[in-house]
Each structure stands twice: as C-alpha cells, then as structure tokens.
Amino acid sequence: MIGSAVLTGRVGDGGLVAGIAPTRIGFTVLILAAIGSTALLTARRRHPLAVFLTECAVYVGASALGLNNFFLVPVLVALGSAVSRLPLWQHLAVIGAACLMATASAVLVAPPGILMEEWLSQVVAVLMTAIAAMLARSVANWRAAQADAKAERERFRVLRAERDRAVSRAGIAAELHDSVGHGLTTIIALSEGLAGQRRPGGR
C-alpha cells in the first residue's frame, strides 16, 4: 500500500489502472527502476544467473505494486540469456526459479477469480522464452560444430598437401642420392682405373 501511495498518489489495489495517474515521484521511481532493470541486462553475458535472479526479485517486487508489466521484458531477456549461456544441468533450476517467480507474481497481482489464468499466462511466457533460448543455443552449437568441422577439414587438407610435398621432396632427394651416389661410384671407379693404368706405365 505504501508503494501504491508513492507511485499513484492514492491507496488502492496497487495497480496503475486507467484513470489513476502516477505522481511525479512515483513516475520518476518507476522510470528509474525500469532503466535500472534494463541496464542490469548489460551484465547478463558475464553473470547470467545473478542477473536473472536479480531481475526475478525486481519482477516480484514490481508485482507487489501491480507494476509487473513494466518489468516483464527485462526478466524474459534475462531468462533467455541464462538458459542460453548456463550449462545444461542448471536449466531446470533456472526454469524452476522462473516458474516460482511467475507463481509469486500471479498471486500478488491477480484477483482470486483469474489467478489460474494469470499464472498460466506467465508460466507459458516463461516456458516459451526458455524453449526459444534452447533452440537458439542448439542452432549456435550446430553452427559452431559446422565451423569446427570445416576448420578440421581445412587443416586436414593442409596437412595432406604438406605430406604430399614432403613425399615429393623425399622422392627427389632419393633420386638425387641415387644419381650422386652413381656419379661418385663412377668417378671412384674411373679414378682407380686411371691410377691402375699409370702405375704400370710409370715404372
């Protein structure tokens, strides 16, 4: 009720319903909170779980004031980031925390007659976001695997070309060795033959 009085200028159900204009202070607090919640998303790549849990707390707090709709997008972005970046074994914990957040928000926001509908709509939003994030992660992993396979094929092609060049060089070296060896053998044989011819004639 205090939050409702600050944000709307009157005590009521806590929601910003049609016809109730927020006070300047309330509007300023709302804008600053929304900007802070959105700015917090900049840290989601380094600390996805901490950002997600903080966004959940902000969302539940906003739900207590009937302002959860202003903070729905940041919490869903944080959820998607957490699901797409955290290890697979933590997905169930993140999705469970998101479902608890949706339950708390539905209990705080919805009147008893539409509690189930509100809870169901929030849980569906959470699950759809989680599924989209998992699909995005799967596509990213598939692309990374394709890129790795392409790099591995290129590396294999380079290694095969180097092996072919080495085999070619070895063949050339063997031919040179044989040729030089044959030439040296011929030179030695001829020099010994010449040396043998000079000895009898020189005596």
Image (spheres, helix red, strand yellow):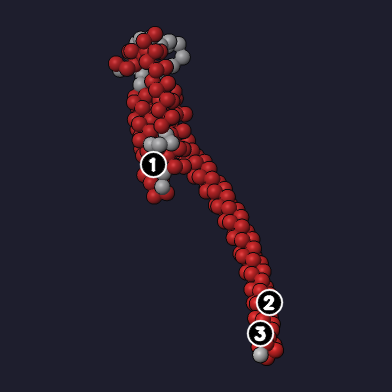
Q: Is residue 72 above or below residue 150?
A: above
How many callouts does the rendering have? 3
Per the image, the residue denoted by label 1 is: 94
Marks 2 and 3 sit apart, C-alpha to C-alpha, by 18 Å
Which quadrant is home to the C terminus?
bottom right
Marks 1 and 2 sit apart, C-alpha to C-alpha, by 79 Å
Disc 3 packing (10 Å; few <14; some 14–19; many ≥20)? few
Q: Nearer the viewer, residue 76 or 167?
A: 167
In the current view of this chain or complex, which residue is farthest to the front? Answer: 203
**Res. 168 image quadrant:** bottom right
The disc, 1 or 3, on the residue closer to the chain's N-terminal end is 1
Disc 2 packing (10 Å; few <14; some 14–19; many ≥20)? few
Disc 1 packing (10 Å; few <14; some 14–19; many ≥20)? many
Q: Amino acid at mark 3?
A: Ala
Q: Amino acid at mark 2?
A: Gly
Q: Position of residue 23 (x, y in %)?
A: 38, 9
Marks 1 and 3 sit apart, C-alpha to C-alpha, by 95 Å
Q: Secondary structure at mark 3?
A: helix
Residue at left 67%, top 87%?
202
Per the image, the residue denoted by label 3 is: 195
The disc, 1 or 2, on the residue closer to the chain's N-terminal end is 1
Q: Is residue 162 above or below residue 31?
A: below
Q: Position of residue 150 (x, y in %)?
A: 60, 53
Per the image, the residue denoted by label 2 is: 183
